[in-house]
Image: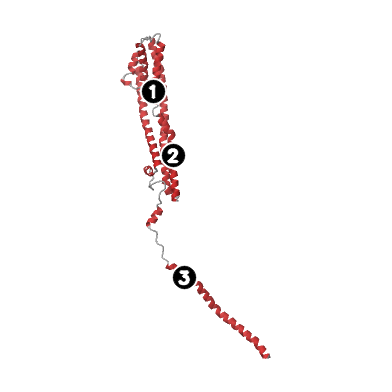
């Protein structure tokens, strides 16, 4: 009985050692199994990646399309000279440009016409004054004023009107050198004033057009610019791009309208001021001649001529 009690603890110790040894032997096998299980998904993923087809290279058409985006606000990208910008602009902007170019052409035409008009008028006026101041009588003044050499000259027309009025008064039996002298001079002055009024209308011809173009040209061009830029920004929103090469041509076309507006307005303002100076100068010369003419008529009437 005593021997049995001693043997039991020894067996228990031996059993525990056996279990520990078996566990240590089984641990490496379990670790190897876990490693194999973890490596299997990675190998499967690697095999799947190798088996997947390679992506096709981008076509040349797609690359050229991405490198050359469609232009916003016009038709032909890459052409920024004024003629191409005009051709590719919107219809409203083209109408504005044509209108401004036409106004500019008329302004330069008025400049040429009125420059020749004032030059010729001043030259003929100088010759007329030299000849007219040598007249000996009222009829002589009328004859000089009505000659073909001075036809159409404003000062010659004034002298002819005054002389004709005095001659009509004589033909009516009035005593132009006596009791009807003052009334004759007054009627001669009225005849000269009528010629002066027609002269003012003649000299101011085309000035209203120059003033209108000079004042409204920039605003007409600005309207074309606003419309063109608005159209360009609408195109930007539709294409969803802010590439400067795409946006710039449409905006440049719009700004061309403002440039044409200034090109038409600036010369018109300069020409208007220049011709106003010429008109004022010739008007002063006319006023001086009217005074000289009335003095000459009064002097000749006093002499009984």
Residue 29 x/y as whole percent: 53, 78
Structural distance between the alpha carbons of marks 2 and 3 = 69 Å
Mark 2 lies on a secondary structure that is helix
Image quadrant where one finds the C terminus = top left
Answer above or below: position of 304 versus 77. above
Structural distance between the alpha carbons of marks 1 and 3 = 105 Å
Crowding around mark 3 (Cα neighbors within 10 Å: few <14, some 14 to 19, many 20+) is few
Identity of the residue drawn at 49% across and 70% down? 41
Nearer to the camera, 17 or 303: 17
| Residue 271 visible from this viewpoint | no
Identity of the residue drawn at 39% across and 20% down? 194
Crowding around mark 1 (Cα neighbors within 10 Å: few <14, some 14 to 19, many 20+) is some
Sequence-first disc among 2 and 3: 3
Mark 1 lies on a secondary structure that is helix
Sequence-first disc among 1 and 3: 3
**Residue 44, numbered circle:** 3
Crowding around mark 2 (Cα neighbors within 10 Å: few <14, some 14 to 19, many 20+) is some
**Residue 199, numbered circle:** 1
Q: Quadrant of residue 172?
A: top left
> Which mark is in front, 1 or 2?
2
Residue 276 x/y as whole percent: 42, 27
Asked if labels 2 and 1 touch by Cβ distance under 8 angstroms, the answer is no
Structural distance between the alpha carbons of marks 1 and 2 = 38 Å
Answer above or below: position of 200 versus 268. above
Identity of the residue drawn at 37% across and 15% down? 165
Q: What residue would you read off at disc 2? A: 223
Sequence-first disc among 1 and 2: 1
> Which mark is in front, 1 or 3?
3
Image quadrant where one finds the N terminus = bottom right
**Residue 39, numbered circle:** none
Residue 243 x/y as whole percent: 44, 50
Q: Quadrant of residue 60?
A: bottom left
């Amino acid at each position: 009985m005593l021997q049995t009690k001693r043997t039991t603890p020894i067996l228990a110790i031996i059993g525990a050692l056996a279990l520990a040894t078996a566990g240590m032997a089984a641990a490496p096998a379990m670790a190897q199994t876990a490693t194999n299980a973890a490596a299997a998904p990675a190998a499967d993923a690697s095999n799947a990646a190798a088996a997947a087809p390679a992506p096709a290279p981008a076509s040349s058409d797609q690359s050229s399309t991405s490198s050359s985006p469609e232009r916003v606000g016009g038709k032909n990208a890459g052409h920024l000279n004024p003629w191409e910008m005009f051709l590719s602009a919107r219809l409203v902007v083209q109408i504005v440009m044509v209108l401004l170019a036409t106004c500019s052409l008329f302004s330069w035409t008025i400049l040429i016409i009125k420059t020749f008009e004032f030059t010729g008028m001043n030259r003929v006026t100088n010759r007329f004054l030299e000849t007219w101041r040598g007249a000996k009588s009222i009829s002589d003044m009328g004859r000089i004023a009505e000659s073909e050499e001075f036809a159409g000259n404003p000062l010659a027309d004034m002298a002819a009107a005054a002389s004709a009025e005095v001659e009509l008064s004589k033909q009516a039996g009035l005593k132009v050198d006596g009791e009807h002298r003052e009334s004759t001079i007054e009627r001669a002055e009225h005849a000269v004033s009528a010629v002066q009024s027609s002269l003012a209308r003649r000299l101011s011809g085309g000035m209203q057009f120059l003033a209108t173009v000079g004042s409204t040209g920039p605003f007409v061009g600005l309207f074309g610019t606003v419309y063109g830029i608005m159209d360009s920004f609408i195109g930007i929103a539709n294409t969803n791009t802010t590439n400067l090469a795409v946006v710039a041509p449409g905006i440049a076309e719009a700004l061309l309208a403002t440039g044409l507006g200034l090109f038409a307005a600036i010369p018109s303002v300069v020409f208007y001021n220049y011709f106003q100076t010429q008109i004022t100068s010739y008007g002063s010369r006319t006023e001086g001649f009217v005074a000289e003419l009335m003095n000459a008529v009064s002097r000749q009437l006093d002499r009984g001529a």
